Image (cartoon, helix red, strand yellow):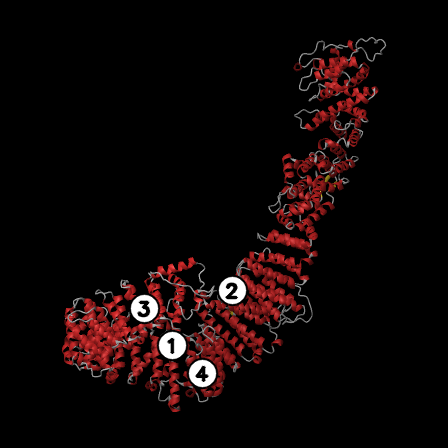
Amino acid sequence: MPSVFSDDREQEGDLSLVTRMTGHSVPGIALAGPPGASPHSAKPPAEGHSQLLQATCIPCLRASLLHPPSQQLWDGRRSCPCSHWVKEAETTDMTESSMKKLASTLLDAITDKDPLVQEQVCSALCSLGEARPVETLRACEEYLRQHDKLAHPYRAAVLRAMERVLSSRASELDKDTASTIILLASSEMTKTKDLVWDWQQAASGVLVAVGRQFISKVMEELLRRLHPGTLPHCAVLHTLASLSVANAFGVVPFLPSVLSSLLPVLGVAKQDTVRVAFCSALQRFSEGALEYLANLDRAPDPTVRKDAFATDIFSAYDVLFHQWLQSREAKLRLAVVEALGPMSHLLPSERLEEQLPKLLPGILALYKKHAETFYLSKSLGQILEAAVSVGSRTLETQLDALLAALHSQICVPVESSSPLVMSNQKEVLRCFTVLACSSPDRLLAFLLPRLDTSNERTRVGTLQVVRHVINSAAAQMEDKKPFILSSMRLPLLDTNSKVKRAVVQVISAMAHHGYLEQPGGEAMIEYIVQQCALPPEQEPEKPGPGSKDPKADSVRAISVRTLYLVSTTVDRMSHVLWPYLLQFLTPVRFTGALTPLCRSLVHLAQKRQEAGADAFLIQYDAHASLPSPYAVTGRLLVVSSSPYLGDGRGAAALRLLSVLHPNIHPLLGQHWETTVPLLLGYLDEHTEETLPQEEWEEKLLMFLRDTLAIISDNAWICQLSLELCRQLPCYDEAPQEKNFLYKCIGTTLGAASSKEVVRKHLQELLETARYQEEAEREGLACCFGICAISHLEDTLAQLEDFVRSEVFRKSIGILNIFKDRSENEVEKVKSALILCYGHVAARAPRELVLAKVESDILRNICQHFSTKVLGIKVETKDPALKLCLVQSVCMVSRAICSSTQAGSFHFTRKAELVAQMMEFIRAEPPDSLRTPIRKKAMLTCTYLVSVEPALDEQARADVIHGCLHSIMALLPEPKEEDGGCQKSLYLETLHALEDLLTSLLQRNMTPQGLQIMIEHLSPWIKSPRGHERARALGLSALLLRYFLEHLRVSALVPFHNLGLLIGLFSPRCADLWPATRQEAVDCVYSLLYLQLGYEGFSRDYRDDVAERLLSLKDGLVHPDPAILFHTCHSVGQIIAKRLPPDQLISLLLTMFEALGDPEKNCSRAATVMINCLLQERGGVLQEKVPEIVSVLRSKLQEAQGEHVLPAAQHSVYLLATQHCAAVVSSLLGSPLPLDSHTCMLWRALAVEPRLAAQVLGLLLEKMSRDVPFKESRAFLLGRTPDRVATLLPLSATCALFEVMSTPAAGPAVLELYPQLFVVLLLRVSCTVGVQLPRNLQAQERRGASPALATRNLEPCSSAVDTLRSMLLRSGSEDVVQRMDLEGGWELLRTSAGHEEGATRLARAMAEHAGPRLPLVLKTLACTHSSAYENQRVTTTAFLAELLNSNVANDLMLLDSLLESLAARQKDTCASVRRLVLRGLANLASGCPDKVRTHGPQLLTAMIGGLDDGDNPHSPVALEAMLGLARLVHLVESWDLRSGLLHVAIRIRPFFDSVTVESADLQGCCFAGPGSPHPRRWSSGRHLSASLGTLTRSATETVRTSSWTRWWAGWRPCCCTCRTLRPPWPAFALRMCGPNLACEELSAAFQKHLQEGRALHFGEFLNTTCKHLMHHFPDLLGRLLTTCLFYFKSSWENVRAAAPLFTGKHHPLPHPHAARQPRLMPPLHRVPGAALGAQAAAAGGPGPAHCGAPDPAEGPGPRGADEGC
């Protein structure tokens, strides 16, 4: 068979688990079940139960035994995990072996250490025994027999399981099985002589259970255990005792044999435990015998008599009483006493009489020794019953002691938690019953005097005994009734609640036994009624629901219950209580007992009605103490006004009133039978909390009014009114009921036809009223108002008569006005009169009251309110008078409004009254609500507003503002614990305000009128206090709902203020107060439907989109901000779908105002909704973008919340996605310098790459569209005009910086890299030296405010910063870093260093951003024709420097660069032309291999540069020289030939120049290593090398005639070899030497002009001149002529060297000298000193300086100071 386990290991684990639990292995277990089925789901087949049983029970046992469920114990088949097998055992024929194995498995598990597991196993065994009792019992017997060494706790558990099976299934046993079980139980019970109570009791229980069916076998086995002369086992005694009770009819026949075996060994028993067992056995034997004797008719042997046991019982009695009772062991004494009670009934009569004198004192003496006296009292009662039954005379002598002992026991205080004490009380009372039946006179003589004692316990105990005796010994007490009644006089006066409770219980017993029919019984009834009238506050705490102590009930509750029970269940009391109980209805002191009285009277009256009309009708003449029908009617009707007081006395009173109708008036039967049930049904529908008091009172008054109408007897009515007036003083302590009584009086007087009676009663009411009581003033006014319904003229006349009467004038005398007390009393009287007029106006017929409103009613009201002293009006200080005035005016106004003629009535005092009401409202404290004045005043204004004439606009505004200010600032709504009245006043005041506002709105049901109302509420809607916002939103929602419900649209007109109102309410959807959030949604909901109404939709139309708002309200209950704002977003979407386009901008502007809301949640909600609207409907806002952006910027400056800025950024982003150009233009209009908020808005446009690219493009366009600066006219002549930056490009530059400072702008910057770089570079170039506008300069000087950005606003610096930011954002950090290190950015900012800065920028770009250059150059190519010179200079410098790097060749940019530079050679700007030459020359270092290719072009450009302008020393020519110096050694030699002569000619002026530029050039070209221009010094070296190259070319190609000019150019080198440092002329001569066709001269140059060696100038000149004269004689003339030119040089060293050089060239003797012409005078005649002097005179150095060698240069040659 397939296994239900997943693998063998799990199966083995389960088997081991069972083994561990049961203590032995379970062999032969096989698993069964379908594949994949759980063990419990397998249905066992008819055979093979054993295998299936064990296989299935293993997991059950594992789950249930190790982890038993806490609530599913094995309580049989229902919850046992193996219950399906137990059920199987019931329904199928399970084999004996299967049952045996199942039982064995369970029995093995009983040894588990967990008590819960043991209990569950026992339950399972019991369940199995229920199904198969015989097999289970046999299995248990076999198990115990086989496991002889099993511990006794487990044996006891098995035995208890067997007992439970036998208790229900013993009848199914056969004799053999019963015998086996009896032997097992007997063996288990007596296996040990020691007392092991748990084990032995379990075995005894098995024997008792079997003995119920097999008593003979059990008794046979037990008797076998009784050995003569030997003490029996205690368990055997216990079993015999239990059997005597369990099966008395089976055991009693064996009792003589048992007693004969036990009695002889009583004296042998020495141990207390054995004696206790004997006592218990004797007690049970006696009880069994008494039961047998009492039921002889059912006994198997009816011939058995008491005499059969008397002798044996007496023998046992003798031992127990005389020997064992004297023991010191309390437990033994109690066991003896407990046995003596039933044994006394079996004693012979004479023996009992003989033993009583000793027995009774012996028992009574034990009361002092034992605290638990229950067993003593129980046994004593049994002994007394036995004594009485035999007619004992000895009892009389013991009676006093018995009564005293028993009385002391009954006076012991009863503890409800002690059941033995309660039982003892019952047993003691049982003893008193026995004594009352035998000696009633002695008993009463003992008890009744103790009623007069003042001790509480004694009196209460005595009353308990009296009550018990009255009930239990009625026959004996029949003739003692007057005596007992008279003895109750003092207990009736006791005020102790326990005594009262006991007295009531005694009276209840008396009522049942006819005591109250005796004289003096009325006092008992009155006592019961008095206790029913006890106030509830004097009742003790009610017992808990689990309390069973009847004495814990209150006195009132017991009295009420007693009165009702006596009235309803004791028939003999009917004639006693009826109509006697009626006299308790009217006295005030019995008011609390009205409900039980009415209920009892109703029941008694119904009984009387059933008996007949004659028995029911009350004979008032015979019962003078009974109240009259008028008094009963008034009393019951008035108390019904508070129907739920006194346990529902209203319903009880009405029922009694309905039942008594024949005794009140014969005509009322049919009407009251119909109306009273309706009133009772109305009460059943409500509770004390839900009953509308005014409506209920009105129903009662209508009931009275109809009753009077049915009676229609003026005399009867007048008598009723008289009785009602008499009852007024009775209700001084019940103001509400007295108020209603006044209304009843007014109703009755209104039904009276006698005017004299009416005016008389009204006059009496005015004279006797207690004006200090507010409720009485109100009641009096209601009385007058109700009376005025039928008697308006008489009522008004009586009020005026009272004012003119002496009573009133005496109270308001002028001398009394200045006394506080008198003044207060007078104002109370005036308050009542004012109220009377108000109620008269409210209730009088409308057709009559309008004529008297102003002439009589208001005139008198105002006259009573205004007090004048000596003609001066005195303001009243009494708030009650103010309140009465307000109430009266309110009632007058309401009467006018409800009149059918109100439309034509012109109320002239309206404005005056409204002003008075507003004055009252303003006088109230705005932060607290103490009086209802403002509520009443607002209600009054509500009615006054509706009366004509209408209020003007200012008055309306004052009313609204004053009322809102009075209510809105109140503290939050009071809670229930703060006082229900305060909360009720708050709610009523708020409702009054709502009514007033809706009344004002009703007068102007237009959108404008609605907006005016909401504008008044707007400050409170935005209040920082939550409760004020909640109130304002609640009022707004109310007004909107009212407006929507009363909307009447006759034509399609626009709802022009929809956006404004929605913008005000919608942010409140996220308010901190949940109520505010809900109301805000309701407001938006109503506004959307108002819009639909104005669009022409019907009122019942339901829009799906708007209806979604209601479903969103649930999301607003949740305090989670995420849920709140998500719901707000959904609300915004709904608004966006239903808002007309023309309202969108007003909605947005209103919501922008909400950004500064002090409630942050609302501000956040506004941002969410703004962005939602912009996202959904932003497409139609193009024309409004500037306004939106402007408002948004201003609100950002005002708002403090950190959430506002991100939301505003998102708003701008959403706008820009739809109207990018408009947003950019609007933001560019922001003032400079940009504040931080505007900067953040710019940055918001860069969050999305596509938008960022669009924004950057627009900014570039804006920057390029306008001129970068404007020139202003200079104030001083000769001063160059100032350049002032224009605002638009400057703003665009700042905006570009902010946009590109956002990391998200990176992709867009990369996309527009070329355009951005070029435009910004040009912006930098054209802003060098440009100033800020004067207004911005002033701001810069004053310093930026904290809100402004700290970035430099100077135009050029701003452009440089933006360019730098652009490079950083595009990933060109290396370029920026290189520029930072080289100081390039600072150079770019200055006019002097700008060119160098552009050069360094180009160098950094070429080195670190080469791949981006092609597109940059392509964009830059379009700017060569720029109108701005600075831009052309910057771009040319940038392009020129690019040729200094090989990146131009690597990126194939060389041709385009050369082309671009060549195109700028003819530029009008010299700087551009100079930079072009520099760039072309840079090719020598950037791409030297390309110089030869472009040699002609380059040389042409350089030579052209030499000829630039008229000034041969212009910067362009000098740059051309430098460029030529760099290029000549790289170009082809034949490219130099054509320009060689021109170059030589152009080089000479460099040495001849005395201008500053030449000096600068010398400093640049020949500067030493420490010079700041090393590049130019190296160019000088290249020039010298180029001269060498030119010289080599000259030797080959130049004609002789040209050599003269060529050598003339080298003359200055000889003159200046000593003048400049570093000695680049020496370097040039040394380089040219090899090309001069004179080896000697070349060697001389190499010798004297070595680099790093000091030059001896005189020796050098001697050697050079010697070789020149020797090898080049033809050139001497030319050289001398040229040298003479330097005699006037501005350089001192040259002037000194020129004469010296000329002197050295004196011609030597020559063979042909005669034929040669003399070119110059003989110089050898001019001494050197003279030459030196001449030179000095010309400004040069003297001979020492010129001719003499420098000491540092070494000694000069011989004859150095001589001429040649």
Between residues 800 and 1463, which one lies in front from this camera angle? 1463
Question: For the residues carrying marks 3 and 4, which lies nearer the camera in this image?
Answer: 3
Q: Which amino acid type corresponds to the residue marked 1 in the rendered image?
A: Gly
Residue annotated with mark 2: 924
**Does residue 1397 appear to the left or right of 281 in the view shown?**
right
Dot 2 or dot 1, earlier in sequence: 1
Dot 1 or dot 3, earlier in sequence: 3
Vertical placement of residue 1314 versus 1038, above or below:
above
Which element carries disc 1, helix, strand or loop?
helix
Cα–Cα span, label 1 and label 4? 25 Å
Question: For the residues carrying marks 1 and 4, which lies nearer the camera in this image?
Answer: 1
Dots 4, 2 in contact, CB < 8 A: no
Residue annotated with mark 1: 592
Estimate the x, y position of residue 1282 in percent, counting from the top left: 72, 39
Residue annotated with mark 4: 721
Residue annotated with mark 3: 139
**Does residue 429 appear to the left or right of 29 in the view shown?**
left
